[in-house]
């Protein structure tokens, strides 16, 4: 299982609706509201890197999303995946 964290800047007036839409994506396991530069923190969990990318693109191109920053997390004791070869 692979995890990706996505920091989201979105329209503040629609942030609750956007968070609800993001939470409905199957691969999304957690959504948090933030204070500061970013408005939302999203955790995506998927069995492959391709599935992570697919879920990320669902968020990135959602109406009301201004910009995103994605971070892929992995335990330092876990074997590194072959990105693009799964």
Image (cartoon, helix red, strand yellow):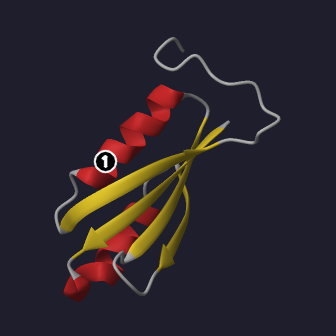
Give how far across and how far down residue 25 sits, in percent: 43, 54
Quarter containing the N terminus:
top right
> At x 32% / y 54%, what residue is drawn?
59
Between 86 and 83, the one lying in front of the other is: 83
Element under disc 1: helix
Residue 66 at x, y percent in the picture: 19, 65
Q: Nearer the viewer, residue 55 or 34?
A: 34
Disc 1 packing (10 Å; few <14; some 14–19; many ≥20): few
Q: Residue 14: horizontal and vertical position, in percent?
A: 23, 82
Residue 63, percent from left and from top = 16, 63
Q: In the current view of this chain or complex, which residue is farthest to the right?
A: 77
The residue positioned 38% from the left and 46% from the top of the image is 56
Q: For residue 67, what is the image quadrant?
A: bottom left
Residue shown at the point (56%, 28%) measured from the top left = 48
On the picture, is 72 further left or further right than 8?
A: right
Q: Nearer the viewer, residue 10 or 46?
A: 10
45 vs 79: above or below: below
Taking the image as shown, residue 30 lies to the left or right of residue 62, namely: right
Residue displayed at 21% across by 88% down: 13
């Amino acid at each position: 299982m692979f995890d990706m964290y996505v920091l989201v800047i979105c329209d503040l007036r629609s942030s609750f609706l956007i968070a609800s839409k993001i939470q409905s994506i199957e691969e999304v396991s957690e959504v948090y509201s933030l204070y500061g530069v970013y408005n939302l923190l999203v955790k995506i969990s998927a069995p492959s890197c391709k599935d992570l990318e697919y879920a990320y693109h669902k968020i990135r191109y959602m109406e009301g999303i201004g910009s995103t920053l994605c971070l892929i997390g992995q335990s330092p004791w876990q074997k590194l995946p072959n990105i693009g070869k799964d």
